[in-house]
Amino acid sequence: MENTSTTTVQPKGGNWSDLWKKEDWLAVWIGFIIIALGSLDVLLGWDFFSALKFKTWALWETLTPEQLESGKFATLGSQLNGAFFGKLLLTGVVLSLLFGAGVKLMGEKLSKFIPAFLALYFIAIIVRLISAEYTLNHYLEWAFWALFVGLLISNTIKVPDWLKPAVKTEFYIKTGLVVMGFSVLFSNIAKFGLYGLGIAWIVTPVVILFMWQFGIRVLKIDNKPLVMTLASATSVCGTSAAIATGAACKAKKEDLSMAVSISIIFTILMMVFEPMIIKALGMSALMGGSLIGGTVDSTGAVVVAGTALGPEAQQAAVLVKSIQNILIGFIAFFVAVFFATRVDNTEKRTVRANEIWVRFPKFIIGFFVASLVASFIFLPAVGGDQVGAINKVLDQYKNWAFVLAFTSIGLDTHFKTIIKQMHGGKVLWLYLIGQTFNILLTFLAVWLLLSGVIFPIPTLTV
């Protein structure tokens, strides 16, 4: 006889103690502490808590006098001074204290975490040093090198057991996303108006729905969290969206590694070749930059690709991507609702309504709060220049958190696992077809809005 019993999924958690014991909430508090330290550093003129920033460097005389004078470039030897190592030590201490406190509150042993974290921090230093080299920095951003170094270690000498307590991918990147929220100003919507909204907010959900239906119904991939995670990474902003959506749909670490790996590989290819194709097609700078902003996954890669087309294209690309980034929280929320009420709520498996709250990634709340505080409290109170200065400080902490996260992804990923997760190549086809659809639909939106045939062409101040 067929078993028709129904399993009710009881939500786990939901207690007040979650506020100081669960990773999601701890990422919010750590992110807020970093935002507070960065704000005080700028507003009080301390210049104490700012994290170390690696200047682009070269071993050989490849830097021009103008680049050296700009302060953004330096020879390797010139920046390895007392101030450099002082900032390096301070950054390590701040990150160790904050993440160490979080780990302690989660019930883990500091005696195991701190030595492992310091080793991971050392690897992150190597990653940032490599990625700041003049030639490497010009073509590939630090995210690639963090993943590459981590993969190299995990697939050759293997990750020692004593290092594993520090490999906490989601903890680092959730914290980075909360910090990132302060830089996502709602005023960006006003700068590009309905044009940016049309390109970023209409195309994105359509692409997610297309990839979901194509992956589940056509390719028949049974791993639904992987399909949703990859769809979000493709249509929004790569790794950040993958982390947020993966948390909302309970994706496994292997699913996240797969989505991030594919996203980074093709982001590099698109960053290099998309500007070339746009030039060959004779598109205007405004249209080309908007297309890049809507289709290239990583924000850093968007800046590089947009710059290749000129300052107007760069600004259009960054504005479209910034407007698109605002969607991260909304998408994570709707994915949590969708999976709780539709995907996991079946005839034999009932999910209670409060499961939506339990599985909702709480760090997204931190992301939104940080964005609202920056947009509607800090911006009117201290002005754009001060907010920009604060974001320069926060940007380095965000980068350090992301480097730790990307390196952890590499350390936690094995090529054999990736091959198994490919589902016979279906996952790769899902990305290729989905990204092609994304490019075509974004191009259509860009043409309709910015070609001048239907609507007047907006003017950006460069």
Image (cartoon, rainbow, N blue to C red):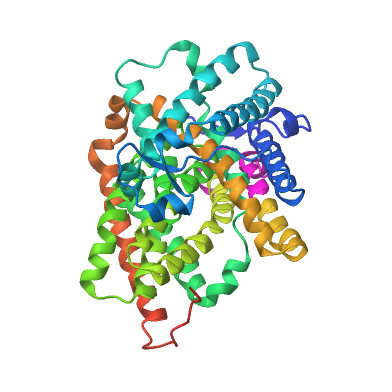
Most extreme residue toward the left is 280
Image quadrant in which you'd find residue 327: bottom right
| Residue at 42% from the left image edge and 80% from the top image edge | 449
Most extreme residue toward the front is 65
State whether residue 301 appears in this view.
Answer: no
| Residue stretch in magenta | 342-367
Residue 346 in the magenta stretch? The answer is yes
Residue 343 in the magenta stretch? The answer is yes
Q: Position of residue 343 (x, y in %)?
A: 50, 45
| Residue at 42% from the left image edge and 12% from the top image edge | 160
Q: Position of residue 198 (x, y in %)?
A: 48, 73
The vertical placement of 199 against 128, above or below, is below
State whether residue 247 appears in this view.
Answer: yes
Q: Position of residue 217 (x, y in %)?
A: 33, 51
- The total of numbered circles placed on residues is 0
Q: Judge from the rendering whether residue 157 lies leftward or rightward of residue 337; answer left or right.
A: left
- Front residue of this view, candidates 336 and 28: 28
The vertical placement of 147 against 452, above or below, is above
Q: Judge from the rendering whether residue 188 lies leftward or rightward of residue 423; answer left or right.
A: right
Q: Position of residue 298 (x, y in %)?
A: 42, 51
- Front residue of this view, candidates 87 and 411: 87
Image quadrant in which you'd find residue 440: bottom left
Q: Quadrant of the N terminus?
A: top left
| Residue at 27% from the left image edge and 44% from the top image edge | 428
The vertical placement of 219 against 22, above or below, is below
The vertical placement of 346 against 315, above or below, is above
